[in-house]
Image (cartoon, rainbow, N blue to C red):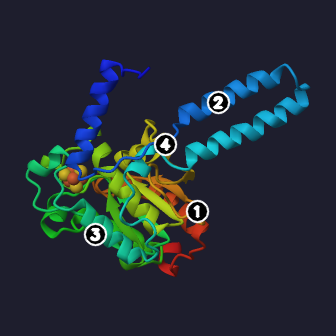
Amino acid sequence: MARTLDPELRSALAERVRYCHELGIYDFYRRETVAASVEVVAASLSSLSSSLPQSELREEMSARKSAVAAVIAEGSIFEVVNPKPEYGVSDPVAALKLIREDLGDCTRCKLHKQGRKQIVFGVGNPRAELMFVGEGPGADEDAQGEPFVGRAGQLLNNMIKAMGLQREDVYIANVVKCRPPGNRTPEPDECETCSPFLMRQIAVIKPKVVVALGATAAKNLLAMNSSLADLRGRFYDFKPGGVRADASWPGARLAVTYHPAYLLRDPRQKGEAWKDLQMVMKYLGIEPPKKAAE
Ligand code: SF4
């Protein structure tokens, strides 16, 4: 007998299909769900538990847990439904171009109708070992279409120079690509809608280190709600979520430091920010220029 869907589930599915159609996605493929895989493994483990000695059972459980983890890590159902145009493109310049094209004249979140002049995609070396991620464009960035070009951008340039690098050596982007009105903090729904594009940029660039500038970037990248003070001073293992990354890329190390705009307001914290950058330099094997090291 044909199964009927729960009305709430039916309505949620209809809403998802409508949303996908708006995005131009019309082809859907059926796939075994992760939940089903977990259920199968759980059932098989419970039948094993009565028949195997404890040591063998532990080994078996560990192997099967890894199998489930692999299913989960292999990718979400949404990735299968919606493969990204840059997948399979090995040249990061071309891949970033495809992501920018996919973003288009984006209206996916409400920031598109709150006074933005243009989308600020990101700038820098598409093969950068070091990537900086800020919160969102300000007035200067909105006017020029490039992240970190105002006063905070000048300070970021100085920080990069103090590390012995040039702005052109690194890649710079933000969590949201449109200017929040009045330079307010981007709201969670805006970050959630826009950040998948940032994740795709990171997956294409494959940096060794990502530096999150300020609390908004740190919390969005790490999905942690701790204070900046708690998040600083250590590296985190980072792989962009929700996207397919090159299997040979082990992921990045992520460090958290103050946003340059905050350092302009409270220059006493510059020493602390420099400590964060020194940690990054040490990891990347960068010797600071003599003047900065003195
Ligand atoms: Fe689109 Fe991002 Fe701009 Fe929102 S902030 S409209 S998601 S580009």
Q: Quadrant of the N terminus?
A: top left
Q: Which mark, by number, is residue 247?
A: 1
Q: Which residue is mark 2?
A: 40
* Type of the residue with mark 4: Arg
Q: Which mark, by number, is residue 258?
A: none
Disc 3 C-beta below 8 A from ligand 1: no
Image coordinates of residue 292 in percent, x first then y, are 48, 74
Q: Which residue is mark 4?
A: 31
Residue 294 in view (yes/no): no
Q: Residue at x 28, y 55 (%)?
A: 261
Question: Label 1 to label 3, Cα distance in Å?
Answer: 36 Å
Mark 3 neighbour class, 10 Å CA radius: few under 14, some 14 to 19, many 20 or more: few
Question: Label 1 to label 2, Cα distance in Å?
Answer: 27 Å
Q: Secondary structure at mark 2?
A: helix
Of labels 2 and 3, the one closer to you:
2
Q: Residue at x 49, y 67 (%)?
A: 207
Q: Which residue is mark 3?
A: 154
Q: Secondary structure at mark 1?
A: loop
Q: Is 253 left, or right, of 9 in this rendering? A: right
Q: Residue at x 38, y 45 (%)?
A: 215
